[in-house]
Image: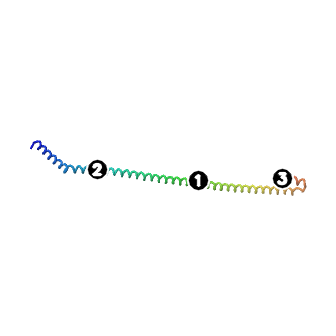
């Protein structure tokens, strides 16, 4: 046989042994590593998708909570406005009631003062009438003197 043919056959056998050895011992760990890497990448992508979904859900929940908080805040503000209006109305009613009470007291005071003034006037008129009657009785009954006394009493009243 030809040495180059022998070399060639030797190389072929060596190459076949190398291929068999690579397929038997090197190729399975390589394919396993590639498959593991593909699986990790797929899991990472799935986790990223889940994280995106969770983030979107959390954002929706936050928006709902903010919306509920705004609604509650508006309700509290409305209640505060209503309470303030009630307080203002109560204060107005109380002020009107106090004004009416003060007015009634003043009117009663005015009526009492008017009654005292009338009573004083009656006392003065009666004392003037008594004094006039005394003067009339002390003098003799003369129509001229009588008329003069009545004019004098009328001037005093």
Q: Mark 2: which secondary structure?
A: helix
Crowd around label 3: few <14 · some 14–19 · many ≥20 (10 Å): few
Residue ID at (37%, 50%): 52
- Residue 51, x across and y down, in percent: 36, 51
Q: Mark 1: which secondary structure?
A: helix
Q: Which residue is mark 2?
A: 38
Residue ID at (77%, 55%): 121
Real-space Cα separation, disc 2 to disc 3, in angstroms: 132 Å
Crowd around label 2: few <14 · some 14–19 · many ≥20 (10 Å): few
Of labels 2 and 3, earlier in sequence is 2
The nearer-to-camera label among 3 and 1 is: 1
- Residue 141, x across and y down, in percent: 90, 56
- Residue 152, x across and y down, in percent: 84, 52
Of labels 2 and 1, earlier in sequence is 2
Q: Which residue is mark 1?
A: 88
Real-space Cα separation, disc 3 to disc 1, in angstroms: 59 Å
Q: Does the residue at mark 2 contact the one at mark 1 (Cβ under 8 Å)?
A: no
Identify the image quadrant of the N terminus. Answer: top left
Q: Nearer the viewer, residue 37 or 93?
A: 37
């Amino acid at each position: 046989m030809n040495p180059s043919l022998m070399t060639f056959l030797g190389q072929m056998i060596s190459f076949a042994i190398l291929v068999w050895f690579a397929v038997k011992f090197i190729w399975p760990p390589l394919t396993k590593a590639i498959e593991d890497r593909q699986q990790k990448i797929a899991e990472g992508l799935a986790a990223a998708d889940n994280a995106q979904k969770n983030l979107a859900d959390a954002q929706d929940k936050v928006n709902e909570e903010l919306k509920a908080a705004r609604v509650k805040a508006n309700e509290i503000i409305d209640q505060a406005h209503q309470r303030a209006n009630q307080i203002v109305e109560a204060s107005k009613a109380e002020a009107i009631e106090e004004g009416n009470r003060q007015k009634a007291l003043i009117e009663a005071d005015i009526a009492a003062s008017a009654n005292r003034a009338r009573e004083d006037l009656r006392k003065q008129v009666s004392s003037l009438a008594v004094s006039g009657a005394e003067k009339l009785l002390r003098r003799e009954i003369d129509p001229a003197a009588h008329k003069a006394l009545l004019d004098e009493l009328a001037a005093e009243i």
